[in-house]
Amino acid sequence: MPLFFYSALFLMYPQTRDLFPVSMAMQRDRLVGALGRIISNVDRVDDLVPFLKQLGRDHRKFSVVAEHYPAVGQALLATLQHFLGDRWTPALAHDWTQAYGLVAKVMTESAAEASTTSPPWWEGEIIMHEPRTPAIAVIRARLNHPYPFLPGQSASISFGLRPRLWRFYSFANAPRRDNTVDLHVRVVDGGTVSTALVYGAQRGDVLRVGAPVGGRLTLDPGRSGDLLLIAGGTGLAPLKALVEQVAYDGPRRNVRLFMGARTSRELYDLEALSKLDAENPWLCVVPVVSHDGLYRGEHGHVVDVALKAWRGQDVFVCGSEEMVQTTVGRLLDAGVPPGQIHFDEFTSDGGKQ
């Protein structure tokens, strides 16, 4: 269905082709995910509207404007008619037209509202690019305008070597006066953006940074208890941002950060975190490796080591999708209340909630 949809769109409105990347494979997957979410919630408008508003704001970075929505609607209806065949009735066509009209209205209004307060993207000049392992780099960029975000949030990033491709990365720092942000980037299989950022980016290059999104890994200002942070790989980034926030706010809580990796070589930010640990008595950083017999520190799965230190703290988890699912399951099995477990949920449209 996605292939037919985009073929119809580009044939009817060839000018829209320039809005999309050269390779459409990932874009087709994102369409299926977004449509699936819309269809499954079509009878629950209140649940659907926040998602549509975010889509509308986010699509500004693709240079999508209100005039593009009728074209997408026509291509979508043509696709449904093609695949439904005799089941495509005038009544069904009317219902889908009305439903898409609502989708387009919410998205365009959200985009218009966002345009009054923020640009479709910020530009950030890379001022530091440090390879930490053969597959991980820490990148610092200085943004061209003030960028309001919360520690724990993420944003979609685009890089000139892979135009019109955007991937989500979490910021590894709390907001700074010099308007810089840090990214921890690991090369992933088939990851064209991550590969370009780790191996192709250099000082002076410019990134495009979308608006900040997500609130699941941000600190609730109404809660002031101690924190237990569990990071897997470059999932360390947003949790390090939380550590910085606690430092900036004043040490009103104790923080235990468990950073997991397969081998000691993959503890790519250990030097910086060890320095933070030494300077702040409220912070305890515990590196954990799972597949390195020569390592002299903690061994095993990071969640198992972290659970030994759980004393009722709020728990924040970040890492790969598999790591998060496994860790959350272990925490629940160990009796950690669901309301005290904070993590990003990966969605089928390629982002994080």
Image (cartoon, grey):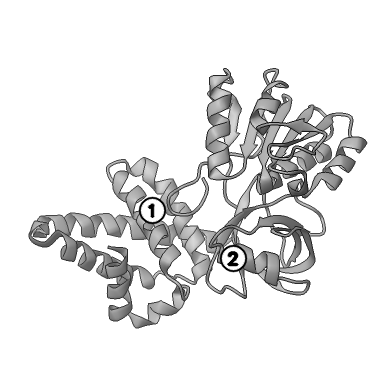
Residue at the left extreme of this rendering? 86
Question: To which residue does mark 2 refer?
Answer: 193
* Tag shown at residue 174: none
In depth, the one of 333 and 206 nearer the eye is 333
Label 1 sits on residue:
33
**Can residue 85 be seen?**
yes
Please provide percent x and percent y for residue 275: 89, 42
Question: In 3D space, how far apart are the residues under numbered discs 2 and 1 (Cα atoms)?
Answer: 20 Å
**What amino acid is found at the position of numbered circle 1 in the picture?**
Gly
The location of residue 329, given as percent across then percent down, is 53, 28
Q: Position of residue 305 (x, y in %)?
A: 70, 27
The local crowd at label 2, few if under 14, some if 14 to 19, many if 20 or more residues have their Cα within 10 Å, is: many
Q: Residues within 10 Å of mark 1 (few under 14, many from 20)?
A: some
Residue 251 relative to residue 288: left or right: right
Q: Residue at x 75, y 64 (%)?
A: 141
As shown in the figure, which amino acid type bears the numbered disc 2? Val
